[in-house]
Image (tube, grey):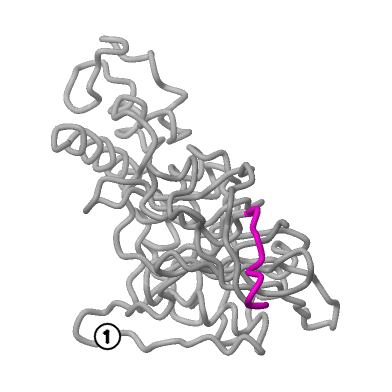
């Protein structure tokens, strides 16, 4: 029998089975082939083969993983292992807040890099646009647009931009990713009020959110626009994260995942041996000076490259 993983915790997975029943399933033999190298063997969105329990209608054993179309993951830095966040998605929705908690564009840059590694299209959603958007925030949003990343500005509080978001999610399986407190659960509650997901206030002391989504969960939603048009949406709400470490590339390949930098590779005076930090005739530094590369994007590039180098040295 086949099934769809809706959520999982402590190696027990809640699966929607093809016979219409929902079962809590463990993994037969406790080790799933092709998943031994991952921090978690399965993620919401995975399709699996399973055996129903002959003694219990709501339990079963997962016997195998059906090959994934794709997966979205990050590096778990404590264990130096890839951590699956979602599987078999058509769209990755990166949610960032315009303010409260503060705008974190470098987190978005990291998500964009990881999504490109996995070949998954990305939609950047700027939430809390009922709050004032500063000039610096507007500058970064416009730079993403310049690089042909699709962006939508919304306010779950006021409903602004939500029709556009619903239409962008329609007839797709999408995954929401974002730091704690950016409003992922609030967005989902607006789209599908019956979900009634837990939300939390922002810490006044640290100006950041607390984790309300502790495990990824797959939802099948019927969403209505303000004009009453119904849209079918499959969406995975991933756990809020504070740090997002890149997985799956070598340090020297970092530039390939920044489109404004990738096109300049090989154009430096010292060719591919250029470190893009201080060399005369560096095409990247010249583009940075001219404003063709945003200074904050260049910083993201530097930080990711350095982090990947340090990970290699550490392990």
The image shows residue 105, relative to residue 113, as above or below, that is below
Image spot of residue 77 (x, y percent)? 25, 50
Identified at 33% across, 54% down, the residue is 244
Disc 1 residue crowd, few under 14, some 14–19, many 20+, Cα 10 Å: few
Q: In which quarter of the image is residue 206?
A: bottom left
Q: Is residue 229 left or right of residue 123?
A: right
Identified at 40% across, 30% down, the residue is 261
Q: Name the residue under label 1.
A: 203
Helix or strand or loop: what does disc 1 sit on? loop
Q: Quadrant of residue 14?
A: bottom right
Image spot of residue 92 (x, y percent)? 57, 55
Residues rendered magenta in the picture: 47-57
Identified at 57% across, 57% down, the residue is 62
Image spot of residue 107 (x, y percent)? 36, 56
Residue at the outermost left position: 314
Residue at the outermost front position: 55
* Quarter the N terminus occupies: bottom right
The residue closer to the viewer here, 193 or 17, is: 17
The residue closer to the viewer here, 172 or 153, is: 172
* Quarter the C terminus occupies: top left
Image spot of residue 81 (x, y percent)? 31, 46
Q: Is residue 153 left or right of residue 78?
A: right
Q: Is residue 71 left or right of residue 113?
A: right
The residue closer to the viewer here, 219 or 35, is: 35
Magenta-span inclusion, residue 291: no
Magenta-span inclusion, residue 54: yes
Identified at 57% across, 61% down, the residue is 61
The image shows residue 194, relative to residue 214, as above or below, that is below
């Amino acid at each position: 029998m086949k099934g769809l993983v809706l959520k999982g915790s402590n190696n027990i997975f809640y699966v929607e089975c093809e016979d219409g029943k929902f079962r809590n399933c463990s993994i037969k033999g406790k080790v799933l082939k092709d998943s031994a190298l991952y921090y978690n063997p399965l993620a919401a969105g995975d399709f699996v083969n399973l055996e129903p329990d002959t003694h219990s209608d709501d339990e079963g054993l997962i016997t195998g993983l059906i090959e994934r179309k794709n997966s979205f993951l990050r590096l778990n830095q404590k264990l130096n292992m890839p951590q699956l966040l979602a599987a078999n998605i058509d769209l990755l929705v990166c949610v960032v807040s315009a303010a409260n908690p503060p705008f974190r564009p470098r987190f978005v840059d990291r998500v964009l890099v990881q999504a490109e590694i996995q070949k998954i299209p990305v939609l950047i959603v700027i939430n809390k646009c009922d709050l004032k958007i500063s000039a610096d925030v507007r500058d970064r949003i416009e730079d993403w647009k310049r690089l042909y990343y699709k962006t939508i500005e919304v306010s779950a509080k006021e409903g602004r931009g939500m029709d556009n978001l619903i239409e962008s999610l329609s007839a797709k399986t999408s995954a929401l990713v974002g730091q704690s407190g950016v409003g992922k659960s609030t967005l989902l509650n607006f789209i599908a009020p019956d979900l009634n997901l837990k939300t939390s206030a922002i810490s006044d002391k640290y100006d950041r959110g607390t984790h309300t989504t502790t495990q990824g969960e797959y939802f099948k939603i019927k969403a209505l626009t303000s004009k009453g048009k119904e849209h079918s949406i499959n969406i995975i709400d991933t756990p809020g994260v504070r740090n997002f470490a890149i997985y799956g590339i070598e340090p020297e390949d970092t530039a390939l995942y920044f489109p404004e930098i990738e096109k300049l590779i090989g154009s430096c005076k010292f060719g591919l041996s250029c470190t893009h930090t201080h060399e005369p005739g560096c095409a990247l530094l010249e583009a940075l000076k001219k404003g063709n590369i945003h200074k904050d994007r260049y910083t993201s590039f530097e930080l990711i490259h350095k982090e990947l180098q340090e990970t290699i040295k550490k392990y």
